[in-house]
Image (cartoon, rainbow, N blue to C red):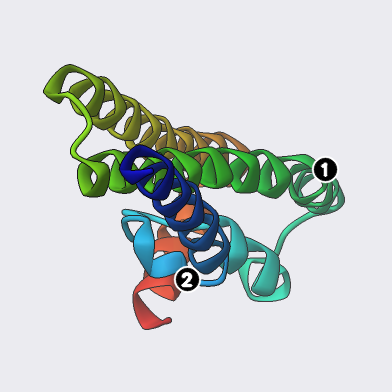
């Protein structure tokens, strides 16, 4: 009976944590950089040409969805780790889950880093400098 109650509590904790985390981005680390919204919002101020505007449009059609999918994986991994900690799962299991959380965090950081490289290649040096200044102001 005790195991059944513990199992039910773990399942409930996982479900509650995943649901709550989907509404609370604060569970994930803040982005180190986030330039795409700044580029999209400031296309006119940056003086983007037609090719650059098309690139922004294409980027916005694919990359945010990929980032959100990875963020969902990261949130789910954190919920599993939280449940394992609460339930007293074996250290090896918690270690594996913690490594998964770390790997997801690394992928998210590198996704933002690669995004910055993309904008550095699409924008002129002057536009990229302006982007950096605009991002500081926001």
Mark 1 or mark 2, which has the lower sequence index?
A: 2
Quadrant location of residue 94?
top left
Residue at left offset 68%, top offset 49%:
64
Position in image of residue 31 (x %, y %): 37, 56
- Please state if 81 lies on the left or on the right of 51 as rendered: left
88 vs 72, left or right, is: left
- Name above or below for residue 125 compared with residue 133: above
Mark identifier at residue 88: none
Q: Is residue 60 left or right of residue 35?
A: right
**Residue 12 drawn at (x, y percent):** 49, 56
Q: Secondary structure at mark 2?
A: loop
Q: Is residue 137 above or below residue 69?
A: below
Residue drawn at x 23%, y 49% is 86
Q: Quadrant of the C terminus?
A: bottom left
Q: Secondary structure at mark 1?
A: helix
The N terminus is located in which quarter?
top left
Residue 4 or 79: which is nearer the viewer? 4
Which of these two is toward me, 68 or 27? 27
Residue 24, label in figure: 2
Would you call the spot at circle 2 few (<14 residues within 10 Å), some (14-19), or many (20 or more)? few
* In the rendered image, the vertical position of residue 16 relative to residue 45, given as above or below: above
* Res. 39 image quadrant: bottom right
How many angstroms separate mark 1 from mark 2 (CA)? 28 Å
Residue 133 image position (x, y, % from top left): 38, 71
Q: Which residue is mark 1?
A: 58
Q: Residue at x 55, y 54 (%)?
A: 15
How many residues crowd around disc 1 within 10 Å: few (fewer than 14), some, or many (20 or more)?
few
- Front disc: 1 or 2: 2
In depth, the one of 12 and 18 nearer the eye is: 12
Residue at the extreme front: 1
Labels in figure, total: 2
């Amino acid at each position: 009976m005790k195991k059944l109650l513990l199992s039910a509590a773990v399942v409930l904790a996982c479900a509650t944590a995943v649901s709550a985390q989907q509404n609370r981005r604060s569970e994930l680390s803040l982005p180190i950089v986030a330039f795409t919204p700044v580029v999209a919002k400031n296309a006119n101020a940056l003086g983007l040409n037609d090719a650059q505007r098309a690139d922004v449009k294409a980027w916005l059609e694919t990359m945010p969805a990929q980032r959100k999918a990875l963020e969902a994986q990261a949130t789910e991994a954190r919920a599993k780790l939280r449940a394992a900690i609460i339930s007293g799962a074996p250290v090896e299991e918690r270690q594996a889950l913690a490594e998964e959380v770390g790997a997801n965090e690394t992928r998210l950081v590198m996704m933002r880093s690669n995004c910055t490289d993309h904008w550095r290649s699409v924008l002129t040096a002057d536009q990229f400098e302006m982007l950096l200044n605009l991002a500081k102001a926001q």
